[in-house]
Image (spheres, rainbow, N blue to C red):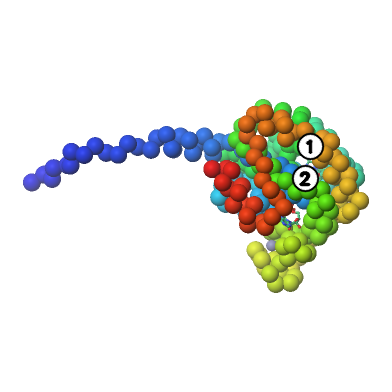
Amino acid sequence: MATLRPSVACPAKPTVKTEALHAVNMESIVLFGPPGAGKGTQAQRIMQSTGLPQVSTGDMLRASVAAGTETGMKAKKFMDAGQLVPDDVIIALIRDRIQDADASNGVMFDGFPRTIPQAEALAGITNVSHVIAIEVPDEKIVERICGRYTCGNCGAVYHDTFNPTKTEGTCNSCGSSDFKRRADDNADTVMSRLSAYHEQTSPLADWYDSKGIFHRIDGDRAIDEISTDILIALE
Ligand code: ADP
Ligand code: ADP
Ligand code: ZN
């Protein structure tokens, strides 16, 4: 005997939710803030939750310098002096990167855009759904930058005092004992980088604020508290 189906209507399919998630996935996030604010640290933590790959123009430029490419040769003198690399170089780098397969659902930009022309170029390349501004006072920046080191194998970011490895000399994430410090992470260059931030990058805050996608996060707190607030802002 055939089993009668219950005459209860099927629950409505969650089409709205699926579409909304799809739309969010197609958009990119910008992590914004002064040098040493914790953009890279937070990008590594929230990457899994967002599913978006981290795109750091600083990391890309350092790789270009190390590989001796034309881009690297153009960028090096600006980086060594703590000045911004010209917009055309940066925009060309991003245009290329955004073509990669892993960028098709959007990315998490770390340290880009840093000027209004870069932000205008970005607007023509991908939709930005959220700009997360990690705010840290200038007086805290020098000690953050001067104590920074990274794992040479996996890129995990550490600090001599504020975020050391659990076991001295061993990366928490991958176990490597190969650590690096950046040539530009010194007290002199930090002052130039901070001036460049205030003069050329901070005007972007109003630019994005006027679009209603700018979220300020207090970055002068424990790393975990900041990650929690970023994930709330992204919901
Ligand atoms: P930080 O982690 O201290 O914010 P980055 O690694 O992002 O520094 O950048 C290092 C250097 O690379 C900058 O001082 C600048 O010379 C150059 N750079 C990185 N991103 C950009 C950008 N979007 N526009 C111009 N220059 C950039
Ligand atoms: P950015 O990418 O913005 O230049 P990083 O993520 O590289 O900044 O962080 C700069 C330094 O500050 C690193 O040594 C990092 O371990 C440390 N750091 C990051 N977040 C915090 C925090 N909330 N409190 C104290 N130190 C931090
Ligand atoms: Zn590592």
Quarter residue 131 falls in: top right
Does the image show residue 207? yes
Label 2 amino acid?
Answer: Pro
Counting residues from the start of the chain, the first of labels 1 and 2 encountered is 2
Q: Nearer the viewer, residue 105 or 161?
A: 161
Residue at position x 57%, y 43% in the image? 234
Left or right: 25, with 146 as reference point: left
Q: Is residue 104 visible?
A: no
Residue at image position (84%, 44%) is 194
At x 67%, y 45%, the residue is 217
Q: Dot 1, how many residues are within 10 Å of its Cα: few (below 14), some (14-19), or many (20+)?
A: many
Q: Is residue 18 left or right of residue 164?
A: left
Q: In the rendering, at what x and y percent does residue 145 appear?
A: 81, 54
Image quadrant where one finds the C terminus: top right
| Mark pair 1, 2: CA separation | 8 Å
For disc 2, the marked residue is: 34
Please indicate whether residue 175 sits to the left or right of residue 116 in the image: left
Amino acid of disc 1: Thr
Q: Are marks 1 and 2 in contact (CB under 8 Å)?
A: yes
Is the residue indicated by label 2 positioned so its CB lies within 8 Å of ligand 1?
Answer: yes
Indicate the quadrant where residue 25 lies: top right
Which residue is the site of mark 1?
201
View quadrant of ligand 2:
bottom right
Crowding at dot 2, Cα within 10 Å, few <14 / some 14-19 / many 20+, comes out as many
Say which of 137 and 23 sits in front.
137
Say if 3 sits above or below 176 in the image: above
